[in-house]
Amino acid sequence: QVQLAESGGGVVQAGGSLRLSCAASGRTFYGMGWFRRAPGEDREFVSSISASGGFTLYGDPVKGRFSISRDNAKKTLYLQMNSLKPEDTAVYYCAARRDGNSGTSQYAAQYAYWGQGTQVTVSS
């Protein structure tokens, strides 16, 4: 069983930066990812990272601005968000893939464990 807890959300002006963290407990050698949901919108893939950290994947809207990383010794996943835009406003969720899956994935159905989410608001 894996439990996930996000932190680091907040309010920031457009062009600013935030770093989200996701602390994991339990078995953690899984591929992990970040998703987001804006008000009235479907859940959207943001980024994913393999268990070793050697492979990463990004959604088109965040490529070149966001960076995913992980520290397996600390059991923590990160999302560095730069050049933030108002359209990045959403609740951000971290997720861990199903048992035995160490690779990246952009598909929410392939993630078994989810955090409660952290709100990111970007003002114009």
Image (cartoon, grey):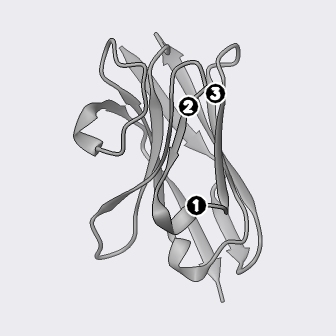
Residue furthest out toward the left: 109
Q: Residue at x 73, y 64 (%)?
A: 82
Of 54 and 116, which appears nearest the observer? Answer: 54
Q: Distance between the residues labelled 1 and 3?
A: 22 Å
Q: Distance between the residues labelled 2 and 1?
A: 14 Å
Element at badge 3?
A: strand
The image's mark for residue 63 is 1
Tell which circle, 1 or 3, labels the residue nearer the N-terminal end.
1
Position of 104 with respect to 68 (left or right) is left
**Badge 2 amino acid:** Phe
Tell which circle, 2 or 1, labels the residue nearer the N-terminal end.
2
**Badge 1 amino acid:** Lys
Position of 75 with respect to 13 (left or right) is left
Residue furthest out toward the right: 16
Residue 112 pos. (x, y %): 28, 28
Q: Is residue 62 above or below residue 79?
A: below
Kindly identify which residue carries mark 3: 76
Tell which circle, 2 or 3, labels the residue nearer the N-terminal end.
2
Element at badge 2?
A: loop
Please tell me how crowded label 2 is: few (under 14), some (14-19), or many (20+) other residues with Cα within 10 Å.
few
Please tell me how crowded label 1 is: few (under 14), some (14-19), or many (20+) other residues with Cα within 10 Å.
few
Kindly identify which residue carries mark 2: 55
**Badge 3 amino acid:** Thr
Residue 113 pos. (x, y %): 34, 29
Are the two marked residues, 1 and 3, in contact with CB atoms closer than 8 angstroms? no
Instruction: Specify the quadrant of the image occupied by residue 73.
Output: top right
Residue 98 pos. (x, y %): 30, 22
Q: Which residue is drawn at 37% across and 38% down?
A: 105
